Image: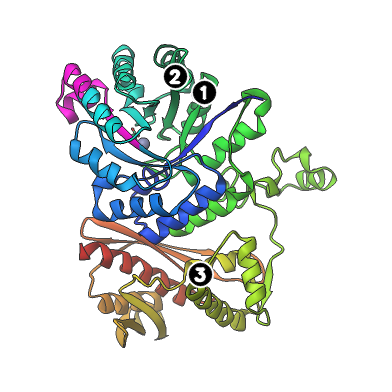
Amino acid sequence: MSDRVLIFDTTLRDGEQSPGIALDSDDKVAIANQLAELGVDIIEAGFPISSDGDFAAVQRIAREVRGPIITGLARCGITEDIERAWEAVQDADRPRIHVFLATSAIHMEHKLRMTEEQVLDAVLDGVSLARSLCEDIEFSPEDGSRSDIDFMIRVCLTAVEAGATTINIPDTVGYGTPTDYGARIKRVVAEVKGDRADIVISTHCHNDLGLAVANALAAVENGARQVEVAVNGIGERAGNTALEEIVMALNTRADHYQVETGIDTTHLYPASRLVARLTGYPVQYNKAVVGRNAFAHESGIHQHGVLRERTTYEIMDPSAVGQDASKLVLGKHSGRAAFGDALKALDINLEDEDFESAFARFKELADRKGEIGEEGLLAIVHDQVDLSDAVHFLGWHATGRDNEAEATVTVERDGVKESFSASGDGMVHSIFAALRKAFELEARLLDYRVEPVSLGADAMAEVSVLVQLRERTFTGTGSSTDIVEASARSFTSALNKAARASAF
Ligand code: KIV
Ligand code: ZN
């Protein structure tokens, strides 16, 4: 084969722009390390000007994560944005600045209030400034798919003249279809890249019509050699091109696309699980590649076929995407070494203190339940105490049912143990009321979901909540063998995020 398609991951920037996702910098570094392990070529770590927290996370990733190019986003016409992005990424081995400015008539008239000439000037100035700071510059004409194509190409040529070497054409609102978006990319490849080997044309597709992956594939067929993606397809509104879907489409149908990526596909499933847990965005059961049912066969005819020959009904091998049926089961007699080996097999590295606290929780749960499988171990690791949390959940007690329940929660704040009690309609409601008192936050519960962590011996439950504090929303997840406790843990995790955000 064949040409290489670069995988540009924007889980931590566009993905994090999904409502309710509030990753802290430890979460972001954990995801970035997993992305590096997966073999992505570029990590878009955030939008440094958007907040001090985002800036700090991008800077940590640039300093700590090795392998991929690390980039930060900046608005093209704004000097402060570009300088802030550079400050955040400059310590990476291979930094990039990604600048964007809208080129569609709708955006120029209503959002930017700029004329075509003003946009051209801003792109020349912005890309030149970025290029004076950093060798690797990407430019995106925002809302590219709805822009007048001749004007958009003039803008892209201006960006190249000013020093950009990656030109990314966003389908910002998911309006494109494979045929028209593909044709647009074909013109950009012919007229902006031409015969320059150093210019890469990129694709960034949103999923408003469910066409993000199809549009990105059409772009590849027409010469795009970078695809912008997010794990599990998260992102603004209906999300972005799903990393796992595009990679497996290019991989499984290499006969057709004749390209390759640098992704180690066996890490796709662990990456999907990590992002789902840390963002609190669940993966739908029938999601391609990483959904729980992606390799499950229900009909007797299908089961019979697969037992005889897997390829009768499977076009991908589950083990190729890290979805092989788990054989990992630990019990209450498993020691530190077995626990450590199991974590290693799941791509998880924990330092001393984190390891000890995860091991203690594993022992507590294994004593109650007997056996803990792979999903249970992942849940334990995710639920670990985060030292930056203001309030740590220690325990609970609740009695009663329906509208007569009473609950007490015990928490630790600043090294001091305290208990708070409240009553409510049922145990979960009263636990949440007690936790609101502990945090002194009047957060509103918007969504509450319970899922079994696994269907096997370790029947733990994972609870996900979405809470609102003033105009912002926060997700939290928690797991336990007891639904009330899992609920308390998830609410504590969301309220800690809300408390952190309201401290700024
Ligand atoms: O969707 C979009 O247009 C973007 C750009 C900033 C690349 O996310
Ligand atoms: Zn986007």
Residue 77 found in image quarter: top left
Q: Say which element carries label 1.
A: helix
What amino acid does circle 3 point to? Glu
Of residue 200 and residue 422, the one placed in the foreground of this image is 200
Q: Which residue is drawn at 47% across and 13% down?
A: 195
- Distance between the Cα atoms at labels 2 and 1? 9 Å
Q: Horizontal and vertical percent for residue 314?
A: 72, 41
In this view, 478 is above or below 186: below
Residue 439 found in image quarter: bottom left
- Distance between the Cα atoms at labels 2 and 3? 46 Å
Determine whether, in the image, residue 103 is placed left or right of residue 401. left
Q: Say which element carries label 2.
A: helix
* Mark 2 vs mark 1: in front: 2
In this view, 405 is above or below 273: below
Alpha-carbon neighbours of circle 3 within 10 Å: few (<14), some, or many (≥20)? Answer: few
Q: Which residue is drawn at 40% across and 12% down?
A: 191
Sequence-wise, which precedes: disc 1 or disc 3? 1
Alpha-carbon neighbours of circle 1 within 10 Å: few (<14), some, or many (≥20)? Answer: many
* Mark 1 vs mark 3: in front: 3
Quadrant showing the N terminus: top right
Circles 2 and 1: CB atoms closer than 8 Å: yes
Q: Say which element carries label 3.
A: loop
Mark 3, residue position = 351
Sequence-wise, which precedes: disc 2 or disc 3? 2
Quadrant showing the C terminus: bottom left
What amino acid does circle 2 point to? Ile
Mark 1, residue position = 218
Alpha-carbon neighbours of circle 2 within 10 Å: few (<14), some, or many (≥20)? Answer: many
Q: Horizontal and vertical percent for residue 480?
A: 51, 74
Q: Horizontal and vertical percent for residue 136?
A: 38, 33
Q: Give the range drawn in magenta.
A: 97-121
Mark 2, residue position = 185
